[in-house]
Amino acid sequence: VHPYTYRNEHEYLHVDFHQDPYAEYDYWVNKIGIDGLFTDFTGSLHKFQEWTSPSNKDEKSASELLSKIEALISSSHH
């Protein structure tokens, strides 16, 4: 599902989101689980994605953990 068209102007933001485009993105992306969306304000959507995505540190930690698990599994098969 790809709803459209998300905008930042107050007259287009629903009052339930307190006229906050980031609250609207959060609702549709994280609570409803849409696959994507169309917006005329790609900069604010990009900011939202940066703020809500895992940091590089988290990704590095997860990658290191997976490598350790892989090594443990590999060593147990020998």
Image: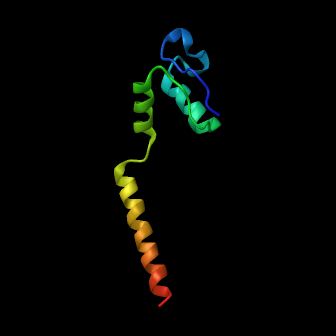
Marker count (numbered): 0
User: Which residue is rendered at x = 40% and y = 38% of the image?
Assistant: 50
Q: Position of residue 6 (x, y in %)?
A: 54, 21
Q: Position of residue 15 (x, y in %)?
A: 59, 15
31 and 67: which is toward the camera: 67
Quadrant location of the N terminus? Answer: top right
Identify the residue at image location x=38%, y=60%.
61
In the image as oriented, which residue stretches furthest toward the bottom?
Answer: 78
The colour scheme is rainbow
Quadrant in which residue 48 is drawn: top left
Residue 73, x across and y down, in percent: 49, 80
56 shown above or below 78: above
On screen, residue 36 above or below 74: above
Q: Residue at x 54, y 8 (%)?
A: 11
Residue 42 position, x and y percent, is 43, 26
**Image-quadrant location for residue 60:** bottom left
Vertical placement of residue 4 versus 36, above or below: above
> Residue visible at 59% across and 23% down?
4
Residue at the far top in the pictured view: 11
